[in-house]
Image (cartoon, rainbow, N blue to C red):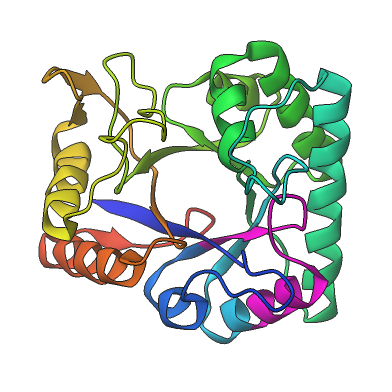
Amino acid sequence: MRVDLNCDLGESFGVYTIGQDEAVIPLVTSVNIACGFHAGDPQVMLKTVKLAKAHGTAIGAHPGLPDLVGFGRRDMRITPEEAYALTAYQIGALAAIAATVGVCLQHVKPHGALYNMAARDAVLAEAIATAVRDVDRNLILFGLAGSELVKAGERAGLRVAQEVFADRTYQADGTLTPRSRTDAMLHDAQEAAERVIRMLREGVVRATDGTDVPIQADTVCVHGDGPKALAFVKEIRERLQSSGVELRAVGE
């Protein structure tokens, strides 16, 4: 078995520090870097790209909604044309930063509310997938496993990576539990690691109602903005490797 281990990073802004980027980047195989709309700024983007390059970690754009105050986690009513433009804009920004240090983007993963909206809305998903293809058809599109975004990426002729979450709970329909609920997050690193192992070995995840939901895991996400992010990454990495799982970036 092999899988990619990714983390959302580069989410600091100005004088505000979010996450433990320097400690987490060496432990993951891919990093999703905020592009300035929901978090991040040009200097943070450059610093994060340099850190990833130094550790041989693959990089991807993490475009979000223009919502710094809400950290991109609040739904916004946007048109497909707006989704296309903001996706292309943010990919281009990070690609330019990456070019200055001699690296290329591996993938694109929408952030937060944009990600979840595209998981449900086929029209919005198509706009995002088309933007990724039009910028660079060699980019890999990350999407929630089994979602409309994955389907749209496949229709657009892109390589897709079906993503699962180590620290989030699932609903019976395969969607993530809304963050507004108290049971949305897993807080025990060992429990999270066991869930990931089961996803890989059995192709299922236990939903909050107790049912097993079929799922495909090409890449596993651990969020980088929580207080236990580093512990989660360490535990999951160690458990995967001790179980014979090879950790490699999806583009390798």
Find residue 48 and report its horizontal and vertical position in percent. 64, 76
Residue segment shown in magenta: 31-50
Q: Position of residue 81 (x, y in %)?
A: 88, 23
Q: Nearer the viewer, residue 39 or 32?
A: 39
Residue sitting at 78 percent across and 81 percent down? 101
Horizontal side of residue 182 vs 86, given as left or right: left
Q: Say which quarter of the image contains residue 246.
A: bottom left
Residue 149, image x and y in percent?
58, 25
Residue at 71% in and 75% down: 44
Establish if 6 lies above or below 82: below
Q: Relative to 89, is 77 on the left or the right?
A: left
- Taking the magenta stretch, the answer to whether it contains residue 198 is no
Residues 106 and 43: in front is 43
Is residue 37 one of those drawn in magenta?
yes
Residue 178 vertical position relative to residue 36 in the rendered view, above or below = above
Residue at x 25%, y 21% (from the top left corner) = 214
Task: Please tell me whether residue 77 is drawn above or below residue 196 in the rendered image.
Answer: above
